[in-house]
Image: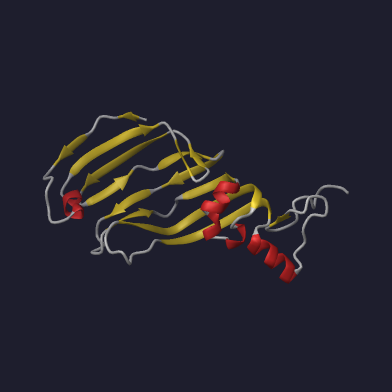
């Protein structure tokens, strides 16, 4: 990425980082060329942080994510006595993000355990967030909170150990031609035999 102009006005000392941020009138940013982690490839986007009036807001992040769209409305919560947190405000969405084996195993398996160790994962996922909060430092006992909706679109995969157990126990249908199965239907259900 490349840097942007910035401005900072206010004291750079205080009892806590939250106190420092509450006292600043600032704008910092960079033009992110892209980022990649856990099988997710984020497209180019500016990241701009604004401090003022006791709040720290991050400009909306609107870009591509694995050939889908991301529209996040983040802010840094300064009011929690346990420490800072990154919040996603209502209206934050992921739309038609392509998933693969790495995304399935490193991210989605926490939401849908059946995807743990799944292979040949293909499909798309969309999500909307009513509330999401990710702690930044503070107490060791703090945990993240995410409330919203997630939709899996045409997700198909080769079952891992949990999927094999579930399929055996419930007789879930798999595709007779490839052995893979989907969250909603076998992957080749529409293919003529």
Eyeballing the image, is 5 above or below 52?
above
| Residue 141 horizontal/vertical position (percent) | 33, 67
Asked if residue 113 lies left or right of residue 46, the reply is right
Quadrant of the rendering where the N terminus is positioned: top left
151 relative to 141 in the view: left or right = right
- Which residue occupies the foreground of this view, 118 or 60? 118
Position above or below: 74 against 80 = above
Closer to us: 33 or 21: 33
Q: Residue at x 53, y 43 (%)?
A: 39
Depth order, front residue of 185/114? 114
State the scheme by which the image is colored: secondary structure
Residue that appears at 54% across and 60% down: 111
Residue 4 lies in what quarter of the image? top left
Q: Which residue: 32% across, 33% down?
A: 30
In the rendered image, the residue lying farthest to the front is 161
Residue 67: where, in percent of width, then height? 56, 38
- Residue at the image point whose x is 68% and y is 67% from the top: 166
Residue at the bottom extreme of this rendering: 169
Left or right, 99 with reference to 159: left
Q: What number of labels is visible?
A: 0
- The front one of 90 and 109 is 109
Q: Is residue 190 left or right of residue 137?
A: right
Task: Return the x and y of residue 123 as percentages of the image width and height.
Answer: 64, 47
């Amino acid at each position: 990425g490349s840097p942007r102009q910035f401005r900072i006005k206010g004291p750079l000392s205080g009892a806590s980082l939250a106190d420092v941020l509450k006292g600043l009138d600032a704008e910092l940013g960079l033009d992110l060329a892209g980022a990649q982690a856990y099988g997710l490839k984020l497209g180019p986007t500016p990241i701009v942080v604004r401090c003022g009036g006791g709040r720290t807001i991050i400009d909306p992040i609107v870009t591509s994510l694995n050939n889908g769209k991301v529209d996040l409305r983040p802010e840094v919560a300064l009011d929690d006595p346990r420490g800072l947190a990154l919040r996603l405000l209502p209206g934050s969405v992921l739309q038609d993000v392509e998933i693969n084996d790495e995304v399935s195993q490193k991210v989605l398996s926490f939401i849908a355990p059946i995807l743990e160790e799944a292979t040949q994962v293909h499909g798309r996922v969309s999500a909307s967030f009513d509330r999401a909060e990710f702690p930044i430092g503070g107490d060791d006992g703090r945990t993240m909170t995410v409330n919203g909706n997630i939709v899996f679109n045409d997700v198909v995969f080769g079952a891992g150990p949990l999927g094999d157990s579930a399929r055996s126990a419930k007789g879930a249908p798999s595709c007779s031609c490839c052995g893979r199965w989907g969250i909603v239907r076998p992957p080749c259900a529409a293919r003529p035999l």
